[in-house]
Amino acid sequence: MTTPLVDMRDICISFGGVHAVDHVSVDLHAGEVVGLLGHNGAGKSTLIKILSGAYQADSGEIRIGGDKVDITNPRDARAHKIETIYQTLALADNLDASSNLFLGRELITRFGLVDDDAMEAETRKIMGRLNPNFQKFAEPVSALSGGQRQSVAIARAVYFDARILIMDEPMAALGPHETQMVAELIEQLKSEGIGIFLISHDIHDVMELCDRASVMKNGKLVGTVDVNDVTDDDLLSMIILGKQPGAKSA
Amino acid sequence: MAHPDTDLPPVRNRNLFQTLDLDVRLLGMIAAFAVLCIGFDLVTGGRFLTPRNIFNLTIQTVSVAIMATGMVFVIVTRHIDLSVGALLATSSAVMAMAQTQWLPNMLGLELGSPLIPWITIATGLIVGTLIGAFPGYLVGYLMIPAFIVTLGGLLVWRNVAWYMTSGRTIGPLDTAFLKFGGINGTLGATGSWIFAALAVAAALYGLYATRRNKLKHGFWVKPMWAEGVIAAIISGTILGFVGILTAYEVPARKLARMFEAKDEVMPEGFTLSYGIPYSVLLLIFITITMTLMASKSRFGRYIFATGGNPEATELAGINTRWLTVKIFGLMGLLCAISAVVASARLTNHTNDIGTLDELRVIAAAVIGGTALAGGIGTIYGAILGALIMQSLQSGMAMVGVDAPLQNMVVGAVLVLAVLVDIVYRKKTGAA
Ligand SMILES: Nc1ncnc2c1ncn2[C@@H]1O[C@H](COP(=O)(O)OP(=O)(O)OP(=O)(O)O)[C@@H](O)[C@H]1O
Ligand SMILES: [Mg+2]
């Protein structure tokens, strides 16, 4: 068994009295897609925000490539080549697509000024791969549709050579064609050896794209399964009933 | 070099404003300003748009305009700074005390020593930056709302200034220091025209460099005739402005006194232009620096990003708390620079210096299109806002409107300006 790329062990975090994530352990290997499933409020987003540096766990540890790491803010996560597509997209609405894509990592000219033209050219290139119909490069992203905004958030996560990619419902607002393009993108990134956490409510997508799936319910981990060993219905019952497949009901 | 996979922008019909790539909002403000000036000029029978009055208007605007550029950054990040007038007063008090008492008495520098103004200014700027940055720490790290922190700051710093000077008027200030006040330090005609020529050259080069960059990436550029129109407008504005300032000449009586003081006889027909005041040069320099910062520096990019979505900016790995400290520190620095200009213009430090400036500065930024909801604002808008406010005030005074009525009008204009802005943004669908 190889060392996992990411190993989150026994993670706990609570907000006030709510145990949003309660002793959860998940892991992810290079070139693997692990699906995170669960009902609304199960704790999926909270769990991955601990990995992306948005939150700090109350207890538990994170290992990357076997080494214990401290991720205390989003900068630490970026330094570990962890990129995240947030469920809320986390875009600055008043800035245009390229300013958002390069936010915090702007390209600069030799005078130290932000090179907007170069950034726009790069943005045009990557958007050409993700969503060729995308044309709104000059407008603030508040003027974009939900799917277009999602494309910008996806572009930002994949542009910077991530090693670990976190996708929190990346296809929620996408049309069928764009969804297909993201599915192809995931296959390609996977073949490049990138590890991906994919949060989705679409069981079909999960069965299609993921190698393993971890199911959460009320902040606890129900279990992790190999998608080849289970059916759609098994996954569904894990989500709804919170039981491992095959476990006999009392 | 064009990128093969850069898709070409779709062919669109562009109207005149789009072709010229002009900011319609800015044009609206300039139009309002022009109407205001011409209106006052008609009512006063041509006394408003004289070189002398324009010169005075310009130097009266500088202090508020300098602070307004910093207020844009503060408001864009969804904060507010109510203490700028008090910061100005404290910086001014520190500088007045430094040049008239501390440096001569404690360091033994002789009054009139060429070191005094520079040590004074350096001290003032450092003090301003520090007492500006401290509330930034309270806002950014301790999460106390800026409204409260700076309301407290207003009381504290206004009274620190009072306490330090025992409420006295401190002066006369150093003669070299007074050169930053306006009329006592100007470039003269030759210097002004050299400056104008350099400014036109720089503007033309800027246009050229922008176009070259866009072409390099294969982006859309304006047609050459449109570039020509823009270049002509910019050059015309620079040359016109300098022309007006140099048209204002030192009054004959004052000239005669200057010659008498030197024991010389004034030649027949001798005239002398004031030209661009150093304080205005300072404002121009600050405007350009702040504009570059706002639109072309990482610092500025993060300021606007924070205004648009603070959480997203934090998630992008930007330390928004430290950013807040820097923004307020910059505001403090600008208040100290304004303190130099304001006290030099008055030739004294007075106890009420900068009183109500917080309101003028916020009004200038807001009239200039800075949105209190954050994320939107421009430096040139704030400067124009400051000019509009000052013209309104001076124009009404010249017409003979009573002081209370003047303030009522200014208050109403502020509210109206914001209303117009809201309607405009709704109409154009801008955020
Ligand atoms: N910042 C917060 N403050 C307080 N409670 C929070 C916070 N973030 C999440 N929670 C709570 O933690 C629990 C888990 O939320 P989380 O967003 O992780 O759910 P999720 O599994 O991503 O759900 P969804 O499918 O709806 O996105 C919820 O009960 C939520 O109310
Ligand atoms: Mg979620």
Image: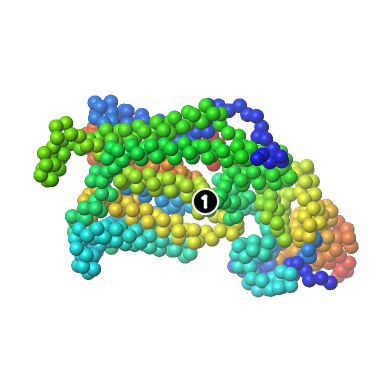
- Looking at the figure, which quarter contains the C terminus of chain A? bottom right
Q: A129 or A20: nearer the eye? A: A129
Q: Looking at the rendering, which quadrant does residue A166 occupy?
A: bottom right
Using the rendered image of the protein, determine whether residue B231 is visible from the camera's viewpoint: yes
Describe residue B251's horizontal placement relative to residue B200 as left or right.
Answer: left
Task: Check the picture and name the quadrant holding the N terminus of chain A.
Answer: bottom right
Q: Which residue is more in the foreground, B15 or A88?
A: B15
Check the image and report above or below for A76 versus B198. Answer: below
**Residue B202: x %, y % from top left:** 44, 40
Q: Name the residue under label 1.
A: A111
Q: Which chain carries label 1?
A: A
Q: Residues within 10 Å of mark 1 (few under 14, many from 20)?
A: few
Left or right of B145, for residue A55: right
Is A63 on the left or on the right of B188, as rendered?
right
The percent position of residue A81, horizontal first and vertical second, equals 68, 61
Looking at the image, which residue is at 43% across and 48% down?
Answer: B289
Q: Visible in this render: residue B64?
A: no
**Count the marks: how many?**
1
Image coordinates for residue B40, horizontal then vertical, percent: 29, 30
Which residue is at 18% across, 36% downward? Answer: B251
**Residue A86 lies in what quarter of the image?**
bottom right
SS category of the residue bearing label 1: loop
- The response on whether ligand 1 sits within 8 Å of label 1 is no
The amino acid type of the residue labelled 1 equals: Phe
**Residue at image x 31%, y 55%?**
B88
Picture coordinates of residue A71 (x, y %)? Answer: 63, 68
Measuring 74% from the left and 57% from the top, which residue is drawn there?
Answer: A199
- Residue nearer the viewer, A44 or B298: B298
State the colouring used for the structure image.
Answer: rainbow
